[in-house]
Image (spheres, rainbow, N blue to C red):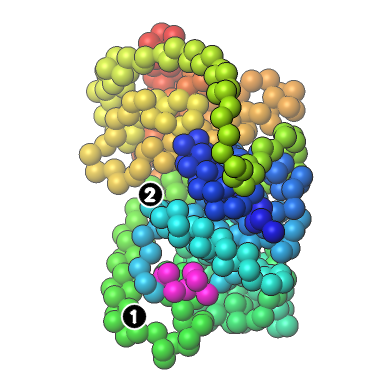
Amino acid sequence: MAIKTLIVDDEEDILQELSTALSNAGMIVFTAKDGRKALDVLKRQDLDVIVTDIRMPDINGIELLLYAKELNPDIKVIVITAYGSEAVRREVLEKGAIGYLEKPFDVKDLIDLINSLAKKPGTEEWGITEILQLINLDKKSAILTVKTPEGEGKIYIVDGDVYHAELGELSGKEAFLKIISYERPKFDIKWTTPKVKRTIVRPLYLLLLEAIVGPSEVPETLLREEKVEEEKKEEAVAEESPLEKALEQIGRLFREVEPEEEAALIETAAPAAPEAVAPPQPERVTAPPPQPTPAVAPTKKIVDRTALDSLLQSLIREMPDIIAIAVVDANGSVLSQTTAANLNIDVATVSRFLVTGFSGLATNVVNANLGNMHEVLISTPASYILIRALKGSSYLIGILPTVKEISLGLFRLKMNKLSTRLEEVLA
């Protein structure tokens, strides 16, 4: 019987190439360019294998795979990852119930892996190990609540790294290893960024390797290398400035808006008819299908970045104590920015978090019939962060230190005037 396989990828040429190759190998192939379409295929078809990259633009890829296993416990999963995994990491991945392929890969390797997984009998239930690997690969943040014979345990993950764990009186690495030692315990996932002190700095693959083979069997060379990396991370945490800590906390706060929106799509995605590619038939000559008339792409507005830079720099000259100021679009992408020379902050990343949070708050304010939200002021012990909505779906973000000699009122007045001039450039 032909293996029914779903391929999920947002690149049309890759979908076509893989679809053709797998069809020529005798498989029945379904394709989906995004998570929404994949959901519909999963609902309509009894599939054997799903091949996907867990990083999706529209929904949480891990939730998609969990939903697939819920619909069909026998479905086999292959995750495409961009990691250039060293041998030890790869060995850990291969011990789980999920198949992995690293980009770039040979199509023959994919076909062999599909055939190998499809032949495995019965249901391969996922445990905490598989979920942790997916979260790590997708660089997600979450709290795993695990039910164990010794009570409820928690694993805290930030950007794919295990930060902390708790089980009874145990904490840190000891608690983590104890939690994952139980055979297939029940667990819940909350997609949020936990605000906990980091007690675990060892990478996940080494933690899992230690759990699998025992601490005495982990190669000494790996432990020495990781000891150096752990010390570097601990030093970096210790040297982090109050402002950097404040901005990171704000970023984590706003990142909590996205996962709930992604999870909601799992329940509300509208169905669309999937397209299957049947195994190859005897060759016959047919007229080529008519090609659709290509759509005319909308003209993309060209932003005068030089003018934006000039306006931001003029405010810096007026208020040289400003730490950072930036103009970003609706996606949080920086159009222009000026920062203090000694600022060790990724303004682009922080801007995306701030815009996401502002957008979510603005929607809630409107839904509560409180009017349109134009500005948000965030106050921390180290800084004031002002976010102003500009016409044309752009935002102005400014960061000012909380120094007594600096007037917050003057800062807001200057930002208000600057907003008007920026809107003229962006119009």
Q: Which corner quadrant holds the C terminus?
A: top left
128 vs 69: above or below: below
Upstream in sequence: badge 2 or badge 1 = 1
Q: Amino acid at mark 1?
A: Leu
User: Quick check: 50 left or right of 414?
Assistant: right
From this view, report whether residue 89 is shown above or below residue 261: below
| Number of marks in the rendered image | 2
Q: Which mark is residue 223?
A: 1
Q: Secondary structure at mark 1?
A: helix
The crowding category of the residue bearing disc 1, from other C-alpha atoms within 10 Å (few below 14, some 14 to 19, many at least 20), is some
* Extreme residue toward the bottom, this view: 216
Range shown magenta: 89-95
Q: Which residue was labeled with disc 2? A: 244
**Is residue 212 visible to us here?**
yes
Q: Quadrant of the N terminus?
A: bottom right
Q: Depth check: give the residue in front, 322 or 334.
A: 334
Residue 210 highlighted magenta (yes or no): no
Residue 318 on image: x %, y %: 28, 21
Please name the residue shown 44% across and 12% down the image: 299
Residue 36 position, x and y percent, is: 66, 39
